[in-house]
């Protein structure tokens, strides 16, 4: 991940709030006061919101507000609004669309501290990481703004002066369904290529993190998109179902769990809709004995403890060649013990709370089960209570390192989605490659070695869509991201994403007389 070194200008009136955030006095004070649906260029309450839910501040465990779920009528209004905007937006040139996306990127860059602060309040990740996420977000818009004007078809010469050409055309109204671990960034990853191709989007964030995506909708409006081009509907499974099965939704892009992905695939299949699925993972990180040990240790921490371990691409199965197993494990423990857990709005915090209480308990239950199955807790794996009394009800745990792990243990086979690293010894390249691929997932994988031939050989053999050599969990927007097997299909980011938000039309032009067989 890349972090911009510049702290840029802030919106008027927000400077005082940011100073308070820097001192962490904002933690425990935010209250939600505005509607979280967005339609026709404004925040609105859903017309048929018959169910409300609470949203939390994970750092304190405090309810920061209630919001209404969207029913079928509200989803229909959001789609109708997006259809009207699509008719305007799709007629603009790529250069015109790109200039508006550039303006939106500029606004996000300008407001990065404000957006990151809200992301941290509602998600729990450290402000340090949230700022990286927001930088990646504006970079995504900037990248696709550059591509928008270059979208083109192909000319094919045919016999007798006739010819054919292809047109790359938008799909229409796309549905985006986001996850709670990267709320703002995922919305940008989905909307930037969609809008660059000329589509409209109706986006449903996770009900756990409903706040920051509405800020993106406001930014798009401020940048100059037609009202309704990017609408937001709040809700849970029912709202997502209304969106996926709406007859005027042309495509669905989903980031989240495998079970939900299966349901979305079933819903989309009924309407023969293209989908992009970015699902779970249980990715391998392979550490060979000839690695640069310091880099491998840092890579293992990056592969396991970003966003409190709540990252789908995490390399949670850390395979270590037996010759360096003890040395590597000791160095990992030293580094893990130094991770500063606490108030996520403090600049020196590196690990905040997990998303909510049920998820914290689920992750802790994985650790308990691992011990029962014979794994050794080398460090952490328990609920953590920070010294600051206002954080005493937050959803914290200490980062966990498990040793003596076996391939058939639940902690090694199932996605935990928390700060739990499983260390497994191996002896040979052939052995570890077979074990690394012995999973139903295939999102990511990594290798640390000085042997560049071995590195390329291993990543060629890994059944994973995103692979790293001598690094892990870097996510430049220029590179396509997506998985193999049950980790999903389709790609986000890079030029590859254009293929998933557009369709080709072939036009055949006859320059002579028609020759008929009749």
Image (cartoon, rainbow, N blue to C red):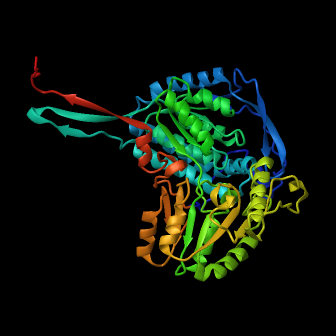
Pick the quarter of the image with the N terminus.
Answer: bottom right
Q: Is residue 379 above or below residue 69?
A: below
Residue 100 can be seen in this image:
no
Percent position of residue 417, x then y: 68, 54
Residue that appears at 48% across and 46% down: 489
Is residue 345 or residue 409 the one in the foreground? Answer: 409
**In the rendering, at what x and y percent does residue 41 appear?**
60, 29
Residue 310's x, y, as percent? Answer: 67, 54
Question: Which quadrant of the figure has residue 400?
Answer: bottom right
Q: How many marks?
A: 0
Nearest to the observer: residue 218 or residue 492: 492
Name the residue rendered at 67%, 65% in the picture.
421
The relative height of residue 290 versus residue 351 in the rendered view (above or below) is below
Viewed as shown, does residue 225 lie left or right of 152? right
Viewer-closest of 497 and 131: 497
Work out whether 216 lies above or below 41.
below
State the residue in front, 275 or 131. Answer: 275
Residue 122: x percent and y percent?
74, 46
The residue lying furthest to the right in this view is 389
**Residue 180 horizontal side relative to residue 107, left or right:** right
- Residue extending farthest to the top is 518
Q: Quadrant of the C terminus?
A: top left
On the question of residue 337 being in view, the answer is yes
Q: Residue at x 30, y 39 (%)?
A: 153
Q: Could you say which quadrant of the image residue 383 lies in?
A: bottom right
Q: Is residue 171 left or right of residue 342?
A: left
């Amino acid at each position: 991940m890349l972090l911009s070194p510049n702290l840029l200008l802030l919106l008027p009136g927000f400077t005082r709030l940011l100073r308070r955030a820097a001192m962490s006095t904002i933690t425990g004070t935010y209250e939600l006061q505005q509607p979280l649906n967005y339609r026709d260029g404004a925040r609105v309450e859903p017309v048929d919101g018959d169910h409300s839910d609470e949203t939390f501040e994970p750092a304190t465990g405090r309810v920061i507000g209630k919001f209404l779920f969207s029913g079928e009528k509200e989803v229909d209004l959001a789609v109708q609004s997006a259809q009207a905007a699509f008719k305007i937006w799709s007629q603009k040139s790529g250069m015109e669309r790109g200039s508006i996306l550039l303006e939106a990127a500029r606004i996000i860059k300008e407001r990065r501290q404000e957006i990151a602060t809200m992301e941290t309040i509602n998600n729990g990740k450290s402000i340090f990481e949230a700022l990286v996420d927001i930088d990646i977000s504006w970079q995504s818009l900037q990248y696709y703004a550059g591509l928008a004007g270059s979208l083109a078809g192909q000319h094919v010469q045919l016999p007798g002066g006739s010819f054919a050409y292809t047109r790359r055309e938008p799909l229409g109204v796309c549905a985006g369904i986001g996850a709670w671990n990267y709320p703002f960034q995922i919305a940008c990853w989905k909307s930037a290529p969609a809008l660059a191709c000329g589509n409209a989007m109706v986006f449903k964030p996770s009900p756990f993190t409903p706040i920051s995506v509405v800020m993106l909708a406001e930014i798009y409006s401020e940048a100059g998109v037609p009202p309704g081009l990017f609408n937001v509907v709040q809700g849970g499974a029912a709202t997502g179902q209304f969106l996926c099965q709406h007859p005027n939704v042309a495509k669905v892009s989903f980031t989240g769990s495998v079970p939900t992905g299966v349901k979305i695939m079933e819903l989309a299949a009924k309407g023969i809709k293209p989908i992009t699925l970015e699902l779970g993972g249980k990715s391998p990180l392979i550490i060979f004995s000839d690695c640069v040990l310091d880099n491998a240790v840092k890579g293992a921490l990056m592969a396991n403890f970003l966003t409190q371990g709540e990252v789908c691409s995490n390399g949670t199965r850390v395979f270590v060649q037996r010759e360096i197993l003890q040395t590597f494990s000791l160095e990992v423990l030293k580094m893990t013990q130094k991770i500063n857990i606490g108030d996520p709005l403090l600049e020196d915090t590196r690990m905040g709370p997990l998303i909510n209480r049920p998820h914290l308990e689920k992750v802790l239950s994985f650790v308990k089960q691992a011990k029962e199955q014979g794994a050794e807790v080398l460090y952490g794996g328990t609920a953590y209570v920070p010294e600051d009394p206002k954080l005493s009800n937050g959803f914290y745990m200490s980062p966990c390192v498990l040793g003596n792990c076996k391939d058939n243990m639940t902690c090694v086979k199932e996605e935990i989605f928390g700060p739990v690293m499983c260390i497994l010894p191996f002896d040979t390249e052939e052995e570890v490659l077979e074990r690394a691929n012995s999973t139903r997932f295939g999102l990511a994988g990594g290798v640390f070695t000085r042997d560049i031939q071995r590195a390329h050989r291993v990543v060629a053999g890994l059944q994973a869509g995103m692979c790293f050599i001598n690094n892990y969990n870097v996510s430049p927007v220029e590179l396509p991201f997506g998985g193999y097997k049950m980790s999903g299909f389709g790609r986000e980011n890079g030029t590859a994403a254009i293929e998933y938000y557009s369709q080709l039309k072939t036009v055949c032009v006859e320059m002579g007389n028609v020759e008929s067989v009749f």
